[in-house]
Image: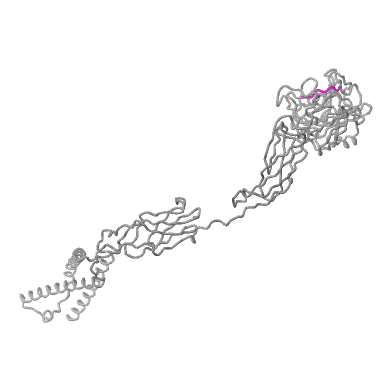
Amino acid sequence: MKKNFPFLLFIFFLATSVFAQNNSINFDGTDDYIQSTFPGILGSNARTVEAWVKTTWNGTQRVIVDWGAISPNGSRYTVNMINGGLRIEVGGNGVTTATLINDGNWHHIATTYDNSLATNKHKLYIDGVFIIGSNLTVTVNTLSTNALMIGRRVDAVNYWQGNIDEVRVWNTARTAAEIAANMSTELTGGEAGLVYYAKFDEVGASCDIVDCSAGQHHGTRLGTGGANNLPQFSTDVPTITDVACTTPLVGCTLAAMCSMDGISVSNISACNNQGTSDPADDTFTANVTVTFTDAPATGNLVLSGDGTAAIAVGSLGMGTFTFTGVSMNADGTPISLTATFSAEPACTLTNANAGTAPASCSVILPPPTCSVSGISVSNISACNSNGTPANAADDTFTANVTVTFSNPPANGTLNLSGDATAAIAVGSLGAGTYTFTSVTMVADGTPISLNAAFSDAPTCSLSNPNAGTAPANCSPNAPTIPTMSEWGLILFALIVFTMMVVFGTQQQTAFAMSSTEGQVSSGARRGGLPFNKTLYFKVLPLVYLGFALVFAIATKAFGYEITNADIPGSLLSGAVIAYLFQFVLVTSNSKKNN
């Protein structure tokens, strides 16, 4: 049975004592039941039946307690449940409560019969409260044909599905006050009027189901199908007070009941840091002593919690065993340990404060600091003019750059900057060194200046302003490249020359025409003819073409180098000057003609 406190069941028979465990009986609803040797209350004698029940069944009848005969009517006394309501039947007639007991919770039920009453000879109680009464229409005359059964009707139908506990039968019709007073406590078995009492706490008894009353009508669990074949002892119990059964057993020997009595710790060692700075692996050792009663015959005694160990039951002493040198974490907290017999998992004990572990003894070191310790250059190639022998600015060379470091960050990149740029993901680095191969730099004959830094640790960097010396440039010294203004003057001179050609041609044409016609004006003779813009714009493209030819000759024959900005700048400069000169000439001619 179920209890609030562990209890010691004294068995005076053979002057022995055993420990009982709190249990109920679980029935599978298929064919589980208990057959007792108690004949029941017979005839029309007064009676009370009590039990604790737990079920979720909702439907046809499910029997809690029954005895008697199927016929004639009135010869059977059945306590059952139908559609969730508590019911009493006497064979041929019955009464049911509207209050339900199938909600999956534990409920105390009681039925009484008192033939001396004028009304309500039959009464039904739920959780100590009177619910309904009736005289029924059938005379009660219970027969001894079938002894008391728990979990089914005498004709092998209506098997109970759920749990039953604390089945009691009295030879009196107990009052509402008596029922309420004793429903939440166990009995000793010697109470007046108690003629049958199944507590279901004595697992493993030779008589299976012990009757704790003086009648000693022990019973047997029966069943051949469904879950586990037989009704099962269950630790699912109602909350009631434990009381020892003091009735001497007759014809029944109880099985010894295992109990775990204590866990203690001794010989606690100093902390061991395992030679590391990690507190997580700090340990200590201690001896753990477990005391117990009636260990099972098989399996192991298992220690768990802050320390783990196991020993075969066959190696145990009498009531005590000490695990020596058990290793545990040194963290300065209470030591929590659990001892359990593997063959009887219910025989277990936890001591959440069996002692105090030593504090951690590791010295926590600061995390290692990232550093870059060296930048060196090797495999310096010869200078490469890159196909522009007259332009030293694009002369390059390649070299390998090796960076030495320690404790790099876990993520990011190692970046190279300065005279060379490159990057590599940290995950691709080797142990302490990495070489950037064939890094391109400017060949200018100066010291090679480089910087290495980790992107995720910017302060983890190093600069080397003289990691080596770049090769000298390999392009020949080109002639001085004319500036934009010089090109402009050259172009201006060409345009002026073009304009002079235009004017000269125009003057010759004018004089020729005048001589032919004899009409040379004084203005023409003074050179005041208007500027021939049409002729100018015809000749100007030829001038630009000539200018391009000058550029080509200058670059190819004399080594001049022209940037992309030189040509358009020079052309623009010359064109602007040409237009300006044109404007002056046209304006001047206009004034002369006026």
**Which residue is pictured at 28% across the width and 66% down the height?**
565
| Spot occupied by residue 285 in the image (x, y as percentages of width and height) | 68, 45
Identify the image quadrant of residue 522: bottom left
Coordinates of residue 216 in the picture (x, y in percent): 86, 25
Query: Where, quadrant-wise, is the C terminus in this rendering?
Result: bottom left
Q: Does 104 appear above or below 582?
A: above
Residue 273, position in %: x, y? 62, 50
Q: Is residue 32 magenta?
A: no
Q: Which region shows up in magenta? A: 33-38
Please determine whether, in this image, residue 505 is positioned above or below residue 340. Answer: below
Residue 489 placement, left or right of 291? left
| Image quadrant in which you'd find residue 104 | top right
Please state if 208 lies on the left or on the right of 114 as rendered. left
Say which of 192 and 86 sits in front: 192
Q: In the rendered image, which quarter contains the N terminus?
A: top right
Residue at 90% across, 36% down: 177
Q: Magenta stretch: dominant SS? A: strand
Is 417 placed left or right of 53 in the picture? left
Q: Nearer the viewer, residue 484 or 560?
A: 560
Percent from the top left, x then y, of residue 137? 87, 24
Q: Nearer the viewer, residue 116 or 356?
A: 356
Task: Give the quarter of the image for residue 551.
Answer: bottom left
Residue, x 21% and y 71% (percent of image)?
491
